[in-house]
Image: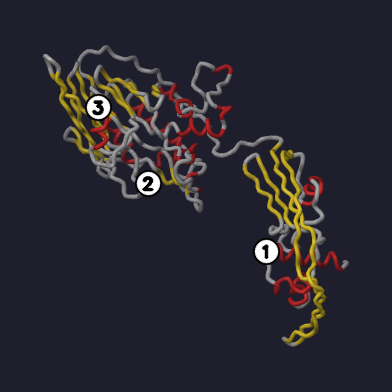
Amino acid sequence: MNAQSTLAEIVALKECGRHSWEEIGKFFGVPQTTVRARYRRRGPDVPVIPCLICGETRPGSHSFAEEGNYAELVVATSERIKSFEDLCAAFNVDLTVWKRIFFECGTHEGWRKNEDKDLEFNSGVMDGHVTSKGILVVPLYRTKARFIRREPVAVHPVIRPMECTTTYKKPEKPKKEGTRRSLLGGDPHFGYRKSPRTGQLVPFHDRRALDLFVQVADYEQPDVIVWGGDIEDFAEMQDRFLQEPEFQQTAQPAIEETHWWLARLRTACPDSEIILMMGNHDIRLRKALITHFKAAYELRPADEIHLPPPLSPERLLGLTGLGIEWIGEYPDGEYWLADGLRVIHADKASQTPGGTAQMILKDTDDWTVFFHVHRREMASKTLYSRHESKSVSCFSPGCLCGLNVPGRKRRQNWQKGMALVDWHGTNRSVHLLEVCEETLVWDRRVFRAVDRVPDLKRDLPMWSW
């Protein structure tokens, strides 16, 4: 073994970053001062080799960072790497996997002390002499290359549409005669924080409130059931708020659990119309496609050209198989239960309790059920014409999510609840149902939420519920 190869081994162990001078000295069987002195006298031409202890290759001098289908290799202060071929050879870049898309090489001057040292370490005392020859100026090189995979791999989040095992026929709308009843809820915000340590999925949605919603639906068998927007939270697809690492790779389990709850709702109410509406969180998926992958926006398979795009909430949630209607086009989407009675998600919000209802009431002459603000609010006004008057109300029944949905602050002025609305002709009657922890009182009955996590684990065992 020549002196140059020994020096390269010393440099590799030191620049690996995991070993002390004492450990390196013991590895070579010499005092730590000897290997330290050799390291300090190294020149710019030391070969790059892996660490002999742990096998890593000088992380201080280069970085090879992979992100999805792209990679970047940056090498600094290496004089012998001046070309793309030298770079790939030095760091074993597999060009059958990676394809070059960018390369540059820059140079600058570096300096260090030019010294001859003759030092010995005896009985705890260093002796010898150091001869200074001034400053040694050497050219240093910085090379940088970017790569793309020749065979792309699926990038996270990997999102797959749900396949409905049982196909339900969409119920026909009944004739508009007699009194009708609808059950309204919204803002479940299906999504999670995923523990980096355990992989546990901590939900934004409130499973107790959702179970109570299904129980009330089963009890009442309403003519129409409406979820008024923000079905999915899509926290990992937004750019407005802090993108926490705990949001990553949570879209797929959220889609699967949403479908699971919708299937329970459809089983409980096979003859009810079920409507889902787009909210400002649901539209995050569309915005993410437009921002980051515009070519995939509205892209459809040739044999499914008349169906919604695969990367759309209605396809991802498997709504067609469940016989559920999707109302998109937020913020303009609306569903009319009857003439003069509509449901919207809303795009207005006031921090003042009751303020949002007043804002929406000012701009409408129709009864309006809205969501978005996660609060129970109601405001009314009376409109007069020459020969008659009519009363108009705007109200929000609350939300079906927990209080941990990412927002501007932790202590939110939110309330959980749902509403039953009866109508006959131009007459309306509203019943606000409050979710209080695990119970709901209605029609002289106490509904108690059931823990559905064991059922989730049985039906969807691949996730850490």
Say left or right for 32 vs 177: right
The residue depicted at 27 percent of the width and 24 percent of the height is 222
Residue 102: x and y in percent read: 72, 41
Depth check: give the residue in front, 321 or 108.
108
Residue under label 3, please give it: 220
* Spatial CA span between label 3 and label 2: 37 Å
Identified by mark 1, the residue type is: Gly
Say left or right for 26 vs 347: right
Q: Quadrant of residue 85?
A: top right
Asked which colour scheme the image uses, the reply is secondary structure
Which label sits on residue 408? 2
* Spatial CA span between label 3 and label 1: 67 Å
Q: Earlier in the sequence, mark 3 or mark 1?
A: 1
Figure quadrant of the C terminus:
top left
Residue 435: x and y in percent read: 26, 40
The residue depicted at 52 percent of the width and 42 percent of the height is 249
Identified by mark 3, the residue type is: Glu
Q: Regarding mark 1 in the picture, which secondary structure is present there?
A: loop
